[in-house]
Amino acid sequence: MAIEGQNKHSREAGQPTTSRATVGELLRVLKARMVTPLALVAILSAIALNTAIALHQSREQRRALEQQHAVESVKRDLDELQNTLLDEHEQLYTVIGTRPFYRRAAYIYPLPLLIDNASAAQQTCEGRERCLALLDELKDMIRHLGRMSNELAMRAMLEPGSVTVATPLLGELDARFFQTMQKIGEIRVDEDAHLDQSVTKASRDSQTTAALLLGSGLAAACLLLAFLRRNAHITKSLREALYTADIAREKYQRLFELNPLPVWIVDDVSTRLVAVNDVAARVFGYRADEMLELRLADLRQDETALHGKSLPHGGARENGTAIWEHRTKSGEFRSMNVFQLQTDFDGHSATLCVMEDVTAQLAAQAELRHRAEYDALTGLSNRKHFDESLTRMLEQAKRSGAALAVIFLDLDNFKEVNDSLGHRVGDALLTHIAKRIERVVGERGTVARYGGDEFMIVTGGADSVLTPLLDSLLLAMTEPAHVSGHELFIEASIGISIHPSDGDDTDTLVRNADAAMYLSKQNGRNQYQFYRPELSKAAIARLRISTRLRQALRNGTLKVLYQPQFDMRSGAMIGAEALLRWTDAQLGSVSPALFIPIAEETGLIRGIGEWVLREACKEAARWNANDARALRVSVNVSPLQFEHGDLIGQVRSALHDSGLLPELLELEVTEGALMRHPDLASRKLAGLREMGVRIAIDDFGTGYSSLGYLKRFRADRLKIDREFVREVGLDAETETITRAIIALAQALNFELIAEGVETNSQRDFLLRNGCIQAQGFLYSQAVSADKIRDIVASHLSGATEAG
C-alpha cells in the first residue's frame, strides 16, 4: 500500500516513476517476488521426497520380513525332511535287524516323498543360487541313499540274516546317511547366515532412510529459516509497506504448517515451546495452545538420547540429530528422530526441532534382532548371542579381576521323551524346563539355550553365589513336570568351569564345562562336577575309544567270554554268563568298565548288545547239542537296549536262528533299568516270559530292592552283587544284609546266585545260609567258548564214568 501510494503521488506530480527506478531496485523487487514461489516449490519437493523415501523404506522392510519367512519355511521343510530320513533309517534297521515270522511287504524307500520335501524347500528359496545348489546336492545324496537302502532291504528280504551290522554296505550306508544329515545342517547354517545378512542390510537401509528423511526435513527447515530471515529483511528495508510484512508472516505460517513432520520451536532460556505446527499437536495429542504452555521436559522422557548425540535444550548453540523417547498426552511413548537447529525467534535464542516418528522402524529392527539372537522355542538367548555376551562379560571380568563361572546343564534321558511321546511334548517340556531354570537363576546370572537339551548359565564365580545356585538347580530338576497331560521326571547333569583358572576365552570355558558335564554323566547323572585339567585328556580318550569301538563292532573284533556258574553243593556246572571283552590293536585290552559306558552314551550298545545275544545263543546251542542237563546261558541287557528297539523281536530272532530252547536263555536286567520306566518294563518282561525266556535281576541289593517291584516284575532268579560277597567275613552289617537277601529270595521262591565268589569262606557262608549257586574265580574265571566246550565235555565224561 505504501509503495503504491508513493508511486501514485509521483505520477500526479508529472514525474514518470520509471525515471527514478534503478536497475538494482528492479532486481530486488523481482528477487523478492520469486522467493515465495521458489520456497513453496522446494518444500513441496521435500514433501514428495519424504513420501517416496518412506514408501521405499516400507518396501525394504516388507522384503526383509519376506526373506525371514522364506528362511523359516526352508528350515521347516528341512526339519520335516530330516525327521523323515531319521524315521526311514530306523525303519531300514528294523527291516534288516529283525527276522519276520510272516510274509511282509517289501520295504521301499520313500524317495519321491523325500525329493518332494527337498523340492518344496527349493521353491521357497527360489532365486538364491547357493540355496538351490545345496538343495540339488542334497537331492542327489537322498537318491543315492534311497538306492542303497532299497538294495539292503531287498537283500535282507531275499536272504534273511545276510545283512548284519558288520556288512560293509551297511557301514557305507551309515556314512552316506550321516553325510546327508551334515548336508542338511550345512543348509541350515547357510540359511541362518542369509538371514543374518538380511537383518544387517535391513538395519543399514533403515539408517540410510532415516538420514535421507532427516536431510529432506533439514532442507525444509533451512528454507523456513531462509524465508524467515528474508521476510525480516524485507520488513526492515520496506517499513513503509507494512502490508508486505503481514503477507510474509502469513506465508511463513503456511510453510510451518505444511511441513509433513512435527515441528516446534523451543526457547533456549525457558525451554518453553514458543511455536508448534498442527502435525506436532496431532501426533502428541494436544491442542496447539496447550502445547505452548509446556516445557520440553514435559514431553521428552529424559535428557539422554536413545541413539546419536544428546543435544542440549538450550545454552550452547549446537546443531545435530538424535533419537529421543517422547511422551504423548495419553501417556504413550514414541521414539522420535529429532533434528535440532539453533536459530532466533522474536529476538531470542531458540531451537527449531523437526521430528520423525521412528517407533515402528525401531520395533521392526528390534524384532529382527530378537529373532537373530534368541531361541524361538524358549525365548532364551541362543548360542550365538550367548557366546557374544560371554565374550563381553569376560572382558569386563578381566578388567575388574572378578571370577566368572560357566555352567553347562544337559538334561538326562530327554531323548526318551521325544522317542516315546513325540517332539511336541518334548518341545513343551523344554519350554517348561527353561522357565524353571530362569526362575532358579533369577538375577544371579544369565541363561541361554545352547542347543537341543543343553542350557548354559553364566554367573559369579564366588562360592557364596555358585554353590547355592547349583544345589537349587539340582533340586528344581527333581520336581515332576506336568506337560501336555503327562507327569514327566527329568534330571540334569551339570558341569562348571571357572574364569580365569579354567580358561581365558569363551571357547575354552564352554569346552571345559562340557567336559565336566560328561564327568557328571559318567558318575551317575543328576549331579554337578567342576572342571579339572585331566578332563580334557579324558574327553580326547573317550572320543578315541568310541571311534575304535565302532570300528571293532563293524570289523567283528569284539569277543565274548563265558564265566561258568556252578551248584556249590555238587560242583556241577549249571550254566555260564556271557561277558563282553575287547582287545584293540592300538589301545590294547580295554576294560568293560571303560568302554561300556561310552557305548551307552553313543548308542553303540544296542548294536553290541544284539551281537552278544546272537553269539551267546549260538554257543549255548552247541553246549546243549548232546548234554541232557541243559546248560543255561545268561546275557546282560543294558538299560538302553532294554528301553529302546525291538528287544523281544531280537530275542525271538536269535533263538530261531540258533535253535536254542527259550528256557535255556536267561536275560540279566539291572534294578535301575526296570525302575526307570516300570510300565514299559512290565510289558517287555511279560512278553519275554511268554516266550519262555528266563529273567534274572542283576546286582540285587544295590538299588531299589523293593518287595513290591519284585512281585510286579516276577523275575526267575536274583543275583547277589559281588560287593556283598566281597565283605563276607569282613563286615557284620553286610553279612546281615546278605542273609536278608537270601531269606527274601527263598520266601518268594526265587532262584539265587552269588557272583564274585573267590574264597572258601565266602562259599561256606553262602551255603550255610541257603544260597547254592555261584560264579567267581574260586570256580573259574571267564574263559573262551572253546574252553567252555571242554568243560562241558569233561563234565559229560565224568557223568558217563560215574554212571
Image (cartoon, grey):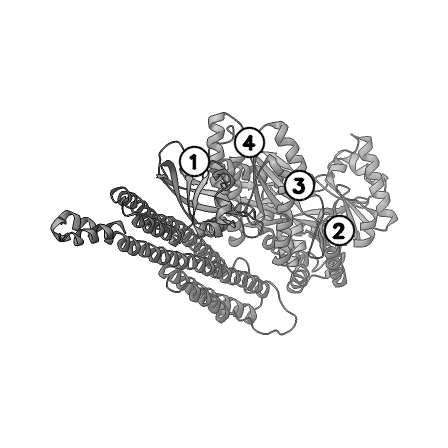
Few, some or many residues within 10 Å of mark 2 (<14, 14–19, 20+): many
Q: Which mark is residue 399?
A: none
- How far is the residue under mark 4 from the one under mark 1? 58 Å
| Residue 704 location, quadrant | top right
Q: Is residue 655 above or below residue 35?
A: below
Amino acid type assigned to the residue bearing label 2 in the image: Ala
CB within 8 Å, label 4 to label 3: no
Q: Nearer the viewer, mark 4 or mark 1?
A: 1
Q: Nearer the viewer, mark 4 or mark 3?
A: 3
Residue that numbered label 2 is attached to: 696
Residue that numbered label 3 is attached to: 526
- How far is the residue under mark 3 from the one under mark 1? 60 Å
Amino acid type assigned to the residue bearing label 3 in the image: Asn
* Percent x, y of residue 166: 53, 57
CB within 8 Å, label 3 to label 2: no
Of labels 4 and 1, earlier in sequence is 1
- How far is the residue under mark 2 from the one under mark 1? 85 Å
Left or right: residue 266 compared with residue 593: left
Of labels 4 and 3, earlier in sequence is 3
- How far is the residue under mark 4 from the one under mark 3? 19 Å
Q: Nearer the viewer, mark 3 or mark 1?
A: 1
Of labels 3 and 2, earlier in sequence is 3
CB within 8 Å, label 4 to label 2: no
CB within 8 Å, label 4 to label 1: no
Residue that numbered label 4 is attached to: 532
Under circle 1, the secondary element is: loop
Few, some or many residues within 10 Å of mark 1 (<14, 14–19, 20+): many
* Percent x, y of residue 802: 79, 51
Residue that numbered label 1 is attached to: 313
Amino acid type assigned to the residue bearing label 1 in the image: His
Task: Count numbered badges in the picture.
Answer: 4
